[in-house]
Amino acid sequence: MPKIKDIPKVDRPRERLLAKGANALSKTDLLAIMLGSGIKGINVQSLAKKIITKFNKSFLDISIDDLLKIKGIGQAKALQIYSAIALIKRFYQEQNSTDLIVKNIQDVLTLTFDIRDKKKEHLICLHLDSRNALIKKETLSIGVLDKSLVHPREIFASSLKCKSASIILIHNHPSGNPAPSEQDQKIAKNINKAAQIMGIALLDFVIIAKDGHTSFYQKIQPNKNLDYVADGFQMGLFDLSEIEKPIYKNNKHYFQQKKSKLGHFQLQNRRYLGNKYKLLGFIEDIVNQKCSGIRSFCDIFAGTGVVGERFNNRNISIISNDFLSANHICLQTFLNTTKQINIKEKINYLNNVKYDENYFSKNFGNRYFSMKNAKKIGSIREEIDNIAGNNQEKNILICSLLYATDKVANTVGHYDAFRKKIDSIKPIHLLVPNIDYSHNTDNQIHQEDANKLIKKISCDVLYIDPPYNSRQYSDAYHLLENLTEWKKPEVVGIGKKMDRKHIKSDYCITKATLAFSNLINDANCKHILFSYNNTKDSKDGRSNARISDEDILNILDNKGKVDIFEKDYKTFTTGKSNGDNNAERVFYCEVE
Ligand SMILES: C[S@@+](CC[C@H](N)C(=O)[O-])C[C@H]1O[C@@H](n2cnc3c(N)ncnc32)[C@H](O)[C@@H]1O
């Protein structure tokens, strides 16, 4: 059998095609050009002839299996021929088609105008093929549209039967108002998710009514081309909303040291794991951009309370909560002291109190503190209970002691461990807190599990800043808890820790995702800001984030529209682990 190179050049199919055009070539020649090369022992023209002869008039109905049966045709060549035929058929069909192509919302409205004025809700499904040609128009339900009645199972069972590539769901609002209800949003979201799993695109979710229509497709891309793009480029609502979820990066430098008042301490003068002092500007920018006219702000995992304090003014009432007693007492002091009291004298008195061996010095002296400071701290704490005239005074005095204690601790900022060498020998000295009495008008301070409290409160903005990883705050700050509560419990181990079973956080264990999901579910608010770090894949397993990004987005997506704000930030770590490359993120959710 001659090889193609043995045929004179002028007789070769490609050369003839170039010289004389397609009409001068036989079907065999055209197929030979498409195949490009023959196979061992058969040149390309003979191979093409074999195929054309074998199938002749049924060539356009050839299947991949038919082709594979020809000796010498492997899978690659079979697919090459098959897809070329399919492509030609597709174009031909489109040119000569009487199919109804659903190009855009106008086509949908034309197809479903009959339900616009119906007294009962009708849910219609348009099943489409990959060209957006209508395969079937189906009425799925008649009567009030309810999440439990419109189950994805029924919709997709029918789509599978029709072999549809995509669907459009349309229902009418007999009230005449086309605005989507909360129930509509939930149904669309549910079906959208199922559609993604099934690989059948939900192209649009349309509400029609006397006063107009709502197309979810239009809502997602309001200023863009509104045709539903077909044939390989079909994007469901799910893909579109994913594209529309940008991450707003922010590298602004905000941090400004607050001016301190001589002889006083400020709320932010504490070393505290995960405190957001340096991110206040970033958080405030998001609130200013997204939440207008707010009247209440809830900082439900308040820690030091810096975030709540930032929004504490005459027009906004603050709800501040933390389940640790030490934090609670400081929040009470700074955010809930409404009556100006002169505490200076009592603080002076405490600074000069006589000290001796006591519970605190026996357990923590020469460990977390110099022996002298430990004796003084224990004695001052004892004396506070004797001299405080009321709860407000007691809170302020303990808060002052906690801040002063922290300043002379022989630690790297928390009480998980102490340093071997005691070099922090500054004598402890209590200061007066710098409280903004005029702003603490209508605030609430709580000491409760966030998931319990959330069921009892409502607010405009809910700021959520839980622990990110498995490090329990009650382990890191056991000593301050002990000093605040002053029940003198037995303490054990090298770290001299008291029993902390009652103050373990669900956000540090495997229950974290469930806890977060329940919190969001129960939240009664207009805006949610959720701070969560991407501290994944750290060498220290304890530092790995507890809730995955995917879960966060799923949970928040169910509550409303989500935007992500991101800022590079070096975290306050224990000093051992590397806090580099952390991006501090705030997930913002506009509650629907
Ligand atoms: C990341 S810190 C918050 C830091 C705070 N935003 C700041 O700037 O200081 C998390 C706080 O949540 C508190 N916490 C942990 N689990 C809690 C729960 N289930 N309920 C209430 N507070 C909790 C911890 O005591 C800790 O103070």
Image (tube, rainbow, N blue to C red):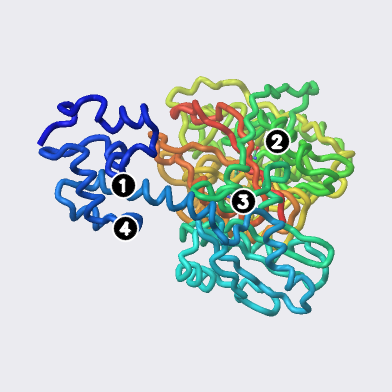
Q: Earlier in the sequence, mark 2 or mark 3?
A: 3
Viewer-side label of 4, 3: 4
What is the CA distance from the residue labelled 1 to the residue labelled 2? 59 Å
Residue placed most toward the observer, 33 or 446: 33
Residue 102 lies in quadrant = bottom right
> Residue at image x 23%, y 50%?
51
**Alpha-carbon span between mark 4 and mark 3:** 37 Å
**Residue under label 2:** 283
Q: Residue at x 30, y 36 (%)?
A: 33
Question: Marks 3 and 1, how far apart in space?
Answer: 30 Å
Depth check: 214 or 456 in front? 214
Res 25 label: none
- What secondary structure is marked by label 4? helix
Residue 326 appears in view: no
The numbered mark at residue 228 is: 3
| Position of residue 291 measured from the top left corner of the image (x, y, whole percent) | 78, 44
Task: Please name the residue that numbered disc 4 is placed on.
Answer: 57
Circle 1 sits on which residue?
81
Amino acid at the residue labelled 2? Ile
